[in-house]
Image (tube, rainbow, N blue to C red):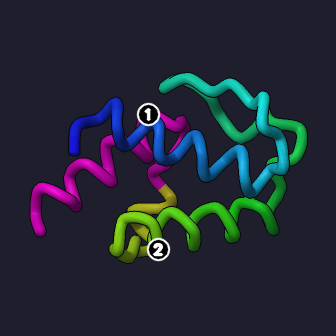
Amino acid sequence: MNKEEIFNTILLTCRTIFNDSDLELSFDSTADQVDQWDSVTHIQLILEIEKSFNMRFSLGELQKLKRIGNLVELVSEKLSEA
């Protein structure tokens, strides 16, 4: 799975979690730029992404995520390790 496919899966997951079918994100998007993104939706999002890609993130990995692009990179790395 390439990074564009990973991004598109994450985007669809975000649209579902945030209940916004028109949500537009980029690799540079941050949680601060999405009105509905709070601590509860953040947990829901991470859990759903873990389920979608059949992986688990460590707390240390999650603390390094600042942008959607960081999340795409992390998923890509973990998929290549599998």
In the image, residue 18 lies in the stretch drawn in magenta:
no
The quadrant of the rendering that contains the C terminus is bottom left
> Label 2, label 1: how many angstroms apart (C-alpha)?
19 Å
Q: Farthest front residue?
A: 21
In this picture, is 16 found above or below 23? below
Identified by mark 2, the residue type is: Lys
Mark in the foreground, 2 or 1:
2
Q: Farthest right residue?
A: 35
Give the residue pinned by disc 1: 69
Relative to 42, 28 lies left or right: left
2 or 1: tag closer to the N-terminus: 2
Residue 23 in the image, given as x and y percentages of width and height: 75, 31
Question: Which residue is located at x 89 percent, y 38 percent?
Answer: 35
Residue 45 in the image, given as x and y percentages of width and height: 64, 61
In the image, residue 80 lies in the stretch drawn in magenta:
yes
Give the residue pinned by disc 2: 51
In this picture, is 67 found above or below 39? above
Question: Which residue is located at x 83 percent, y 55 percent?
Answer: 38
